[in-house]
Amino acid sequence: MPQSLTIILGKAVRYAARLRGGGSALPGLFVERISPSFVPDTLAQLPNGIVVISGTNGKTTTTKMVVALLESQGLKVFTNRTGSNFVRGVAAALLGEIDMKGKLDADIAVLELDEAHAVKFVEVVPPRYSLLLNVMRDQLDRFGEIDTTARMLDQIAVATTDTVVVNREDERLRTVGSLITGKTVRYFGLHDTLLSQFPTDDEMHEAASATKKKPAQRPDADVVLKNFNEQGAAFTINGKDFVTPLKLKGVYNIYNSAAALALVRTIVPKASINSLLGALSTVTPAFGRGETLTVAGHPLELVLVKNPAGFRLGLESYDSEGYATMIAINDNYADGRDMSWLWDVDFTSLSKDSVYVTGVRAYDMALRLQYDEVSMEKVNTELAKALAEFIELHPDTPKRIYCTYTAMLTLRKELSKITRVEVVS
Amino acid sequence: MNIYGDHGNLQVIVRRLEWYGYTPKVVSYNVGDKLPKNPDIIIGGGGQDSGQLKIHADLLKIGPTLKQWANDGTPMLMVCGLYQLFGHFFRTLNNVMIEGIGILDVETYGTNERLIGNIITTSDKFGDIIGYENHSGQTYLGDSAHPFATVVRGAGNNAKDGHEGALYKNVIGTYLHGSILPKNPAVADFLIKTAVKRKYGSFSKDLIDDMFATMAREVARDRPR
């Protein structure tokens, strides 16, 4: 099929899908079916090439940071900002951006891709740069086991043509990095004193009891996160120390800002560090990732939790004192069907609170809290009703909701009826 | 080998013992550690294939002691990876033989098919047992082995026999994650009761409110595989 026709039909389906209020994947699926070369052909035009960002946790917020940093250096960036990170999601995003001749007005594409989809994507479209964030236990029901996920990221590294940016604190990724030949590898990392705050899945249950571990031999990193607090972070970049304020919350978001800096320094080597930090300081969390809405004059934070490491870091990042807390756990396909992961999270930090529990698997969550002796104010599997009641019960208190992916989508939809919720297209 | 939420099993044993008025002492055993003397309950989890290789030599070394304890009646729960290694062997797809410690009369073969999803099984002893399975090794029972449960929905030991896990004396081998014990208090209480009776001669069960477990079981029954 001629590309021009693909574009017209694709745009038409996209328009129709949006009228219907539907998701972003349908028009992409349509284009993928009728013209498999649409995505590679369109992206091949870009003068600065393609960047792929992958890993278990933090892809969406990191992508947002990378885009902001590249834009601060005057580059026009195409990105898949809905977090619909499958090939068809990219196709759908492209349809919204190209003109009728198929021309994409951008210098560079920054794409967040789920590990399994990234592997398929890079087979068709080799990226010039890739950023490998972390390999954590997530969706084992889809990928089988962590080592399988690590092999997927290895395939992304192999397909990358110029530079791979790697988290040196992730043992599996460090191995991936050490085996790369014929292209450049750059690292981002943590100062030794922060290592104990980021235990790996393998160390998770040992973390509490383990005496200070001697850090393994690690390669030099271009950007090292040295320290951070509520207001900002200190980095060592290319051997020099810098401090910047940050709007991002959550320790993993702050660590991933080191990843974004390392990646953008690779793409734009002449960028001044101060201008990059200036741009970084204005980045806010991606939707549902520590996003703050206002309900009846009080803040309501949505914290996306997808896996044990993310949930644990979320609980560590946000002090529950003075907040009403809700946990919403679904088990739809996108969330993962398996509930085992809840047992790898320690909830004792909530033991002073009374938590409202909801979602399809509310009772699994309640059972988990029971064994950590955390009290619950209510368990209600119906999300919309639970949200309304939770807000009613706490009219004068800031609220925080930890939610799985599909629970977040439902909650945002409900919240959009009563407050301003950013529409993400 | 604790990467798969099987930590929940330990938490459940510890808490329930506390709720029953006992003071449990947890000894975590890692490769190269000295084995504790006469443990009351032994639990082990699943792991990555690479994790299985890491512990293998050490497991063979302590195998005879574990076997002695199993024969003496010590209650044990071995999930997934350790269930497989409590059998005679695991033969991988590349025909590599990984020798087990032979407490359970089972053998396991690596396959290309991953048996994955919510699973419901049932047994006379424990009632319905509900969990989640995720394994590509398929296990076959020998003549002297008893299955832990019969599959109601899901796969179990392998894709065709319709049974799940193995039971020998007080040793349970199973593929069920979830974790298995939180949603199946009957299995947890079996391990606890057996251990307490062995140690103190009798066990009187106090009441624990298992309402959340009951509700979570009801919800899990109706979820897609």
Image (cartoon, rainbow, N blue to C red):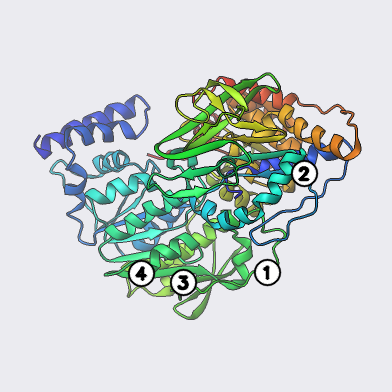
Q: Chain of mark 2?
A: A
Q: Find residue A185 and name its label.
A: 4
Report the Cα–Cα distance between label 1 and label 4: 29 Å
Question: Are discs 1 and 4 located on one and the same chain?
Answer: yes
Work out whether residue A322 or residue A177 is closer to the camera in this orientation and state it.
Answer: A177
Report the amino acid beneath label 4: Val
Report the amino acid beneath label 1: Lys
Q: Earlier in the sequence, mark 2 or mark 3?
A: 3
Q: Chain of mark 4?
A: A
The quarter of the picture where residue A232 lies is bottom right
Q: Residue at x 43, y 42 (%)?
A: A143
Q: Which residue is mark 3?
A: A223
Dot 4 falls on a residue whose secondary structure is strand
Report the Cα–Cα distance between label 2 and label 1: 27 Å
Q: Chain of mark 3?
A: A
Report the amino acid beneath label 3: Val
Dot 1 falls on a residue whose secondary structure is loop
The count of marks equals 4
Report the Cα–Cα distance between label 3 and label 4: 13 Å
Q: Which residue is mark 1?
A: A212
Please rate how many residues cluster around mark 3, counting C-alpha atoms within 10 Å: few if below 14, some from 14 to 19, many from 20: many
Report the Cα–Cα distance between label 2 and label 3: 37 Å
Residue A221 percent across, percent down from the top left: 45, 73
Question: Are discs 2 and 1 located on one and the same chain?
Answer: yes
The quarter of the picture where residue A401 lies is top right
Q: Nearer the viewer, mark 3 or mark 1?
A: 1
Residue A294 visible in the current orientation: no
Q: Is residue A234 above or below residue A410?
A: below
Work out whether residue A267 or residue B148 is closer to the camera in this orientation and state it.
Answer: B148
Q: Which residue is mark 2?
A: A351
